[in-house]
Image (cartoon, grey):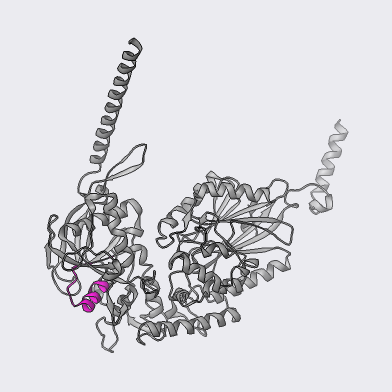
Amino acid sequence: MRKLTIILLILLVAGSFLPAASAETLNLPSTQADELFFTILHTNDEHSALSPTPLVDYHREEQDPTLGGFARLGQAVKDIRAAKEAANEPVLLLSAGDFLGGSPYSWLTLSGRAPELTIMRRIGYDAVNIGNHEYDYGPEQLAKYLQAAGYPEAKERTLLLASNTRPPAGHALNDLGIKETAVLTLPNGLKVGLFGLIGIDAVNVAPSAAPVEFADQVETAREMVAALKNAGADVIVALSHSGEDEEVALAQAIPGIDVIVGGHTHVLLEEPIVAGKTIIVQAGENLRHLGCLELAYNPKTGNVRLRNSETGKPYAIILDDSIPEDPDIAAMVAAYTSDLNALVAEITGGRFPDIAETVAWCDFPVVNTPILQETPFGNFVTDAMRLVAEEATGEKVHLAFQANGTIRGSIIPGTCPWSLQQISFYDLASLVGLGVGPDGNAGYPLISAYLTGQELSRVFELQVLLAELMGDTYFLQISGGRMTFDRGRAVLLTLPFVDLPIPTTRAVESAELYSGQGTQDTDEYQKLNKKEQQLYHVVTDYYIASFLPMAGELLPSLELVLKDKEGNPIENLDEAIIRRDGRELKVWQAVLEYAALQPQDSTGNPRVSDYYAETSGRLIQHSIYPPMWKGLVLAIVLLASFLILGVHKLRQKRRNKIISNS
């Protein structure tokens, strides 16, 4: 035994001086040796960002600070594919949805073009999910867009996925090759199963999707995972336009998903979220980054693992000017830019013939942060709506309001020698250009209507309630008024068991209307009487005007009836659209014109007023009552509920006793 021990020790010491043997040379089983490597490149929320942003800083010959653009994306994808092909490693390119909406390039949709998806097909996307902004112009227009992009024939190269989307029978979307699932067999033999979801919050902010309906996300995922496993998929990837919170919940509910390529919340995950065995990624917005997942699949265990830490490849590749532009994609972008310039010149009567032209100057950012608060850019947008509407209608506008969900960012002036302090048409229009009007042209039109003082008080209450219940998307920025409120007082309590919030309608402590002229830069205010029946002129956009009256259907105490200036209820909202020279006046037009009408500087250029460098005390939040009052009320309600339940059980027991004795 002692001899055997000595021999083993000698062999071990000798072995330490020999080169390490691989699993192949030793012919030993190794999980890593059996793995199949593959890479997933991914984007989400591209939002029609064909060109780098901010466009005002973009320069083809000079170094610039811009990010994104399809031409840079095309070259980055081409370079990665070439490197991976040399290593015999397959690559998938996927989008989690919202390739439409945001920049003015999306306006070309309404002219029968499909720039985003056409370019994505040329770059070589393998699959694209359908998000909420694909419905910005309605499902009928989406069907026309997909046809213009080459579908249903194009599905052979670039799949369209929408697993929980349910168009009605006979709808054109049913005939365009949109799939619930697909299995792609990669060159190394790996079978990747794909499906696509649109999430709960995304559905809630897709007002133009009707009559398309959406099935339950978790149940749909469960069905899709089972179907893909039955079809022989080794790896299952969900393209999910839901946001990371919903995607983590999905991974926890459905453990069979290996990778979730996410979107909707515009979050840049510099490292994946790992929920159980599910890898969750998201690559920000507007093509500023290209997501890169280097993965390994083990056929013996069925596990998928990350390899980026081994290869040193970042999970998010920044698409800055260090990446050259793919010349073919750049030529496509240039052609669509020419089309867009012609369209903008037409719809503005020649006032803005070039999307790259400077419309105003500014020596500070006009920000739209923080969330759930008054912001400088929110004030700029609503001031534009109020003051341009006054000029267009010839009547004083007492209040204008706009939701944060349709204000898409902040004004960031140019920073380069050729763009210093400049704001371009494209960059500003991209912040306020969502939606479409009844005229079929891009942008929500302005609505002119009248409400009583009592109803205006309800608008202020709704401002607080909607934000508290539904988040920043529904937070209303205002012009022409100011209020003091307590968000914590918006909801009295949430009824247990049914999860039903009960509003107080007492969240606003005080509300006033501005009685001065122009911007709210003086202290001329009049208090708003909560029971006042006098009519006041209000302006908002078409979508909000159609949405606000619905609040009264759910909460009669917050009923709003839009009226004309004689006090007659407006039966057809189209009649309340502000028109100028026979055309609908859009929100984006009001904002662009307001920017161009800013006070002139010493060189004669319109320069954004210093008034918008900060907020002006329009929306003042503070705690009216200490938080304990809610707990006290809840305790009283729960006690009352238990007493009622106890009395009910006692009566039932007595009734049963009487029945048994009879």
Q: As rendered, which of 113 and 508 lies closer to the eye?
A: 113
Q: Residue at x 33, y 58 (%)?
A: 474
Residue 493 in percent (x, y) is at 28, 42
Residue 395 in percent (x, y) is at 17, 75
Q: Is residue 579 toward the left or the right of residue 55 in the image?
A: left
Residue 310, quarter of the rendered image? bottom right
Is residue 216 depicted above or below 660 in this figure? below
Q: Quadrant of the C terminus?
A: top left
Residue farthest toward the top in the current orientation of the protein: 661
Q: Residue at x 52, y 75 (%)?
A: 115
Q: Quadrant of the N terminus?
A: top right
Residue farthest toward the bottom in the current orientation of the protein: 603
Magenta highlight on residue 289: no
Magenta highlight on residue 400: yes
Q: Residue at x 28, y 31 (%)?
A: 641
Q: As rendered, which of 384 and 204 lies closer to the eye?
A: 204
Is residue 32 depicted above or below 648 in this figure? below
Q: Is residue 332 visible?
A: yes
Q: Is residue 363 toward the left or the right of residue 232 in the image?
A: left
How many marks overall?
Answer: 0
Is residue 152 depicted above or below 624 in this figure? below
Residue 512, quarter of the rendered image? bottom left
Residue 85 in percent (x, y) is at 71, 68
Residue 362 in percent (x, y) is at 32, 78
Q: Is residue 378 visible?
A: no
Which portion, as a residue range, is magenta? 383-401
Residue 545, quarter of the rendered image? bottom left
